[in-house]
Amino acid sequence: MRQSNRGVLTASAALVVVSLLAACGSSLYTSTITADSVKLGLLVPQSGVYAPLGTDIRRGFELYLDGRGGQLGNRRVTVVVADEGAEPDTGVPAGQKLIQQSQVAVAVGVVNSATALGLVQQFNAAKVPLIIANAGANALTGAKASAYVWRTSFSNDDAGASMGAYVASRVDSGGVYLIAPDYAAGHEQIAGFRRAFEAAGGHVAGADYPPFGTTSNYQPYLARIQRSGARAVFAFFAGAEAVAFVKQYKEFGLAGTIPLYATGYLTEGAVLRSEGDAAVGIQTALQYSSELDTPTNRAFVSAYTAKYHSSPTVFSVAAYDAAQVLDHALANATTGPEIVAALGRLGDIDSPRGTWRFSATHNPTQRYYLREVREQDRTLVNAVVRTLTN
Ligand code: BEZ
């Protein structure tokens, strides 16, 4: 089967990328924002299980920036790219260096929830705005949200919650088995689903949380699922773990016998290419699909595909929108407090995912879509079945 996404990250003409001087311990930069320039940090995984997500985030950000001639808020942008790696032990120091050594005026990115949670205090204390383009930890934009932390992606319990009643209506009393990696995002993604699923009368047949970042053999978990008598599975995995889980689910003989539901990260972007036919039929909930048939998304998909020879993903859209909100906010703001005040004044954002706006606690208020992996024109896509919630 032909796959829709190909190619590697290409350097952008308009985007000036400066490697993070992680080891040298000194700063080359003292000024981060002037009347006509701004220095911005991009903190994304370039290694580890979430590296493909980092590529998509970088591409989405570059696409918006290139479309503005390398400027945001009429200021020429210099981007310092830092490797988040897979976990907080790499991501937190990389984020600290963006603040302390590179002295960025604002940062974008962060994939891993635990890493983002470890960085909140640093950005808050430095009064440097952090626009999270993925990490979904509920507390990041919960009741105690930080003034300097904003999110253009999602909150971990949202996608699963949007799907709970739907799955409950399709599964009989044998129940649903829950599975996700054992870290903040895994537990929260499952909890969001479980609350809505049980409220709709669903029964949970069992749950497992394999170690995050180190599990490559899911056979013992798949055997437990089989023995449990569950009639369906609900999962959260992303990146390399999503590929391993989906392929082994099919190899073990569960695909086609026990339907697999998930939050959309399981089948999004590069992982779907690697999963291939093993992913066909999986139903997921997410706030985006490249298949959304709207004028804004069609234009976005066409520009993205022309540049990267690859379909955009939910990760690229979150980063594209992070650049978009900064474009507006930086127009009249030169300090951290001014930038966050400007973010608070933004209204509706016209996005490839549909229109959204920041909630009072800095999280997107957005629609979720039911998607199904189908083959279309000999390519695997996340076809949009319908809207789940607004
Ligand atoms: C998270 O850690 O919040 C996360 C990582 C990958 C996909 C979705 C959420």
Image (tube, rainbow, N blue to C red):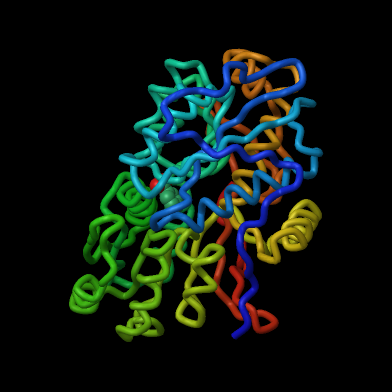
Q: Note whether residue 161 is visible.
A: no
Q: Note whether residue 295 is visible.
A: yes
Quarter of the rendering containing residue 371: bottom right
Quarter of the rendering containing residue 172: bottom left
Residue 283 locus on image (x, y percent): 49, 69
Closest to the observer, 252 or 214:
214
Residue 88 locus on image (x, y percent): 33, 40
- Total marks in image: 0
361 to 372, vertically: above or below:
above
- 71 to the left or right of 386: right
Q: Report the residue at 59% width, 85% height from top.
A: 1
54 to 27, vertically: above or below:
below
244 to 315, vertically: above or below:
below
- 212 to the left or right of 292: left
Closest to the observer, 258 or 47:
47
287 to 25, vertically: above or below:
below
Residue 312 locus on image (x, y percent): 65, 58
- 178 to the left or right of 153: left
Quarter of the rendering containing residue 171: bottom left
Q: Report the residue at 57% width, 21% height from top.
A: 29
Q: Report the residue at 39% width, 55% height from top.
A: 48
Closest to the observer, 281 or 301:
301
Q: Report the residue at 65% width, 73% height from top.
A: 4
